[in-house]
Image (cartoon, rainbow, N blue to C red):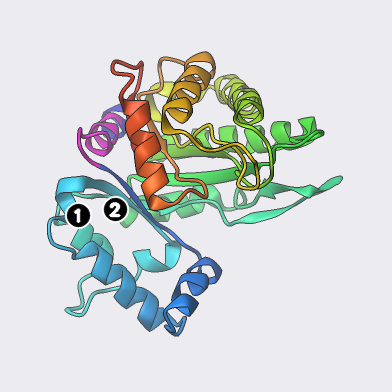
Amino acid sequence: MLKLILNETIKKLLTPGRGILAADESVATIEKRFLKNNIQNVEEMREAYRELLFTSKGISEYISGVILFDETLRETDGLGRPLREVLRSQDIVVGCKADQGLLPLPNSPEEMVTKGLEGLADRLAEYYDLGVRFVKWRAVFTVGKNFPSELCLIKNSELFASYAFLCQEAGIVPIVEPEVLSDGSHTSEQCFETTERVLRGVFAALEARSVDLRFILLKPNMIVPGQDSSEKMVSEKVGNLTVSCLTAAVPRQVPGIVFLSGGQTEEQACENLSAIAQHGSLPWSVTYSF
């Protein structure tokens, strides 16, 4: 029964021509966006902002699922309807951010570890009752001479595995988001090497924990040069390197890859996604989660 539920969710999320809207900004993150437009960061305004997104005309033509922040799951629109029901009424799958942010990694404080595993099983049960059918967990990795450390990779990979196992037990599809950050002056080739190493570590941990790879989605970064690099970003190169990296490191059982934009402009992310899609028949469905 659980596998049927997971499979149905996967099929809806990977509907051709549609992608996943990441509307799960934390209170602190959304404040940066609001400040640029002189908007006060209070719950009433966050609620109104997200209602505006979710009621945009024709949204369901292009959006198959929406990742919500925990707060948004409990909010309503101007008519008193829960925002999660506004989405479901448009045949959009309701998702949620499952992790609770980042903390400095003990013994390697320049790196980060994801928090939120404590109490996760109970939160997933509540989310399921609220109509959530997929969730996201993010970990970040830095490109550098000594980064990511083996400690960082092992710890975050183990957390991904525990998270994904609990999700599948709850009938919820886990999105696994190991983001190799674009901060820094590294080259595309260095991003490739780090991303391949991270993905291999994450999938080794998932398989060791008996996570069923047929019922997860991967949300990786594209292979791009660092934001401070002298290397120019070229979409054709991004597409070639990204496909090569994923082909080498991502098991064929994974049904879909939903790319993050990772510090790119909207135009760059779309151009690079298009370049990836030009490679035609890939082992996985490919779409976005911007």
Disc 2 marks a residue whose amino acid type is Gly
Residue type, numbered disc 1: Arg
The residue segment tinted magenta is 7-18
- Residue 61 visible, this orientation: yes
Residue 212 seen in this snapshot: no
The residue beneath circle 2 is: 131
Q: Is residue 36 above or below residue 58?
A: below
Q: Cα distance, mark 2 to mark 1? A: 9 Å
Residue under the image location 87 percent in, 45 percent down: 107
- Mark on residue 88? 1
Q: Residue at x 50, y 74 (%)?
A: 31
Residue 215 sits inside the magenta stretch: no
Q: Is disc 2 surrounded by few (<14), some (14 to 19) or many (20+) residues within 10 Å?
A: some
Spot occupied by residue 149 in the image (x, y as percentages of width and height): 78, 34
Helix, strand or loop at mark 1: helix
CB within 8 Å, label 2 to label 1: yes
Residue 132 vs residue 102, the one in the foreground: 102
Where residue 214 appears, as percent x and y from the top left, is: 38, 22
User: Residue 264, percent across and down?
Assistant: 48, 48
Q: Position of residue 71 (x, y in %)?
A: 42, 68
Q: Is residue 14 magenta?
A: yes
Mark 1, Cα crowd under 10 Å, few <14 / some 14-19 / many 20+, is some
Left or right: 144 with respect to 137? right
